[in-house]
Image: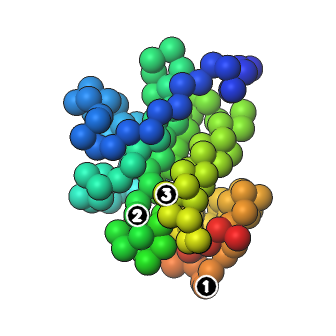
Amino acid sequence: MTINIKNSLDYQWLNFSELSKELVYEILSLRQNIFIVEQECWYQDADGKDLEALHLTVKIDDSLVGYLRVLEPGTSYSEPSLGRILVRKDYRGIGLGKEIIKKGKEKCYQLFPDNLIKISAQIHLQEFYESLGFKRQGEPYDEDGILHIEMLST
C-alpha cells in the first residue's frame, strides 16, 4: 500500500472529555485487536489512565489507523510517558509509527519542557525506538507475558 502520509492522514489531539463515545469505542476496539488478540496478551487495557491522558488519533478517510496516549509525570512514571502506541495492521511498514511517535515526543516536550520521556517498549522494538531517540534503561522485564524494556528519550 502506498499513501502520502503527510497529505492523507488527519492527526488530532484530544482530552478524554473531547472524545466522542464512538471514538472511544473505536480506540478501545483497535487497542484490543492489536494488544490482546493479535499479540495474544491477556491484560486489563482499561487501566483508568485514559481519563487523564491526552490522546493522539490518526485517521484516514474517517477510519482510525494510528493512536497513542500521553501521560503526565506521576501517572505511570516520574517522567511524562507515551503509551498504547499502535498502527493498524494494514498501515504498518510505511513510516506511520515513526510519525506518531515524533508527534508524541513533540507534544510531551511542549507540555512538559525540561523532562525526559519514558516508555515501556516491547523488547523486539528496542532498535526502532532507539532510531527515534530513546535509550534503553535497565534490564528486560516481563509485562503480561511479553518482554519489555524501559527507555528514556535522549
Quadrant in the picture for residue 139: bottom right
**Viewer-side label of 3, 1:** 3
What residue would you read off at disc 1? 138
User: Mark number for residue 111?
Assistant: 3
Give the crowd class for mark 3: few <14, some 14-19, many >=20 residues within 10 Å.
Answer: few
Q: Residue furthest right?
A: 131
**Viewer-side label of 3, 2:** 3
What residue would you read off at disc 2? 72
- In the picture shown, does residue 32 fall above or below 58? below
**Tag 1: residue type?**
Gly
Residue at 29 percent across and 55 percent down: it is 52
User: Which badge, 3 or 2, comes first in the chain's sequence?
Assistant: 2
**Measured from the top left, where is residue 29 in percent x and y?**
34, 36
User: Which badge, 3 or 1, comes first in the chain's sequence?
Assistant: 3
Q: Nearer the viewer, residue 11 or 46?
A: 11
- In the picture shown, does residue 18 fall above or below 124? above
User: Which badge, 2 or 1, comes first in the chain's sequence?
Assistant: 2
Quadrant in the picture for residue 118: bottom right
Give the crowd class for mark 2: few <14, some 14-19, many >=20 residues within 10 Å.
Answer: many
**Do the CB atoms of the residues marked 3 and 2 lie less than 8 Å apart?**
yes
**Tag 3: residue type?**
Leu
Q: Nearer the viewer, residue 139 or 73?
A: 73
Q: Nearer the viewer, residue 73 or 141?
A: 73
**Measured from the top left, where is residue 71 in percent x and y?**
41, 60
Quarter of the image with the C terminus in it: bottom right
Badge 3 element: helix
Residue at 71 percent across and 38 percent down: it is 95
